[in-house]
Image (cartoon, rainbow, N blue to C red):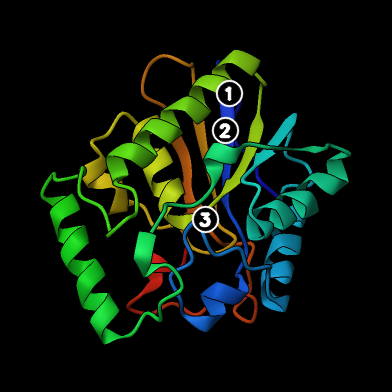
Amino acid sequence: MIRIRRIAGMKIFLVRHGESEGNLGGTLQGCRLDTPLTRRGRRQAEALAVRLAEAEFDDVVASPMARARETAEICAAPHGLAVRLDLELVEFDWGVWTGLPLDDEMDRSVAELRAKWRSGDVDAGPPRGESPLEAGARAARVLNRLKAVRPAAPLVVAHGRFNRILMATLLGRDLARMDEVRQRNGSISVFEWDGEKAATPLLLDDVSHLGGDVSTPTGKVDWARA
């Protein structure tokens, strides 16, 4: 159960989807590869739903991709809320790298790209994919739509890389810092946001609701389990 003090402003519950078939297979998924949750991924979503059962969210918005949509539906069911789909919550576009195995060669290629991002070159992207700058523009539009709808406590369900970009945008940080907060499968992060200033983080990448047999094993490519 999440018990966080309520202060003025919108409280945003941000969730990363449960483990997907693509995560399990060790491939770069991005927005072009739409794989469903694994059995463990559904158990992660169910554990998250139990944890969120008494959370007072009043809106649920999700990426239309199967792994995020299914996670959102499982979490929304106890509250009797419908899931709104936002096309701009889809995962980062890995371009021609989509669907490739995360082997040593691909790990080196992505590591080189991430080094560029950390150095501040957030306009760089994978071949025929998008850059963090482009994905950050999507994140800003998502937040502007939330601001316009103005729910008191929305639950937002999306993806590993995009959530990092969304969090950096929400916190008013440079996108070069997006990897400072992990995004594990089935994790929950909570923010207080007034719609104007940088948000206040109340909880980041929390997976305390997942037992050892439910958590997705992590490794050197955990950053990319999108």
25 sits left or right of 36 in the view:
left
Residue in the picture at 24% in, 83% down: 105
- Helix, strand or loop at label 2? It is strand
Mark 1 in CB contact with mark 2 (< 8 angstroms): yes
Residue in the picture at 20% in, 43% down: 123
Along the line of sight, the residue nearer the viewer: 26 or 215 = 26
Mark 3 in CB contact with mark 1 (< 8 angstroms): no
Which label number is shown at residue 12?
2
CA–CA distance between discs 3 and 1?
23 Å
Residue that numbered label 1 is attached to:
146
Q: Nearer the viewer, mark 1 or mark 2?
A: 1
Which label number is shown at residue 206?
3
- Helix, strand or loop at label 3? It is strand
- Mark sitting earlier along the chain (1/2): 2
Q: Residues within 10 Å of mark 2 (few under 14, many from 20)?
A: many
Where 178 falls versus 109 (above or below)?
Answer: above
Q: Residues within 10 Å of mark 3 (few under 14, many from 20)?
A: some
Q: Nearer the viewer, mark 3 or mark 1?
A: 1
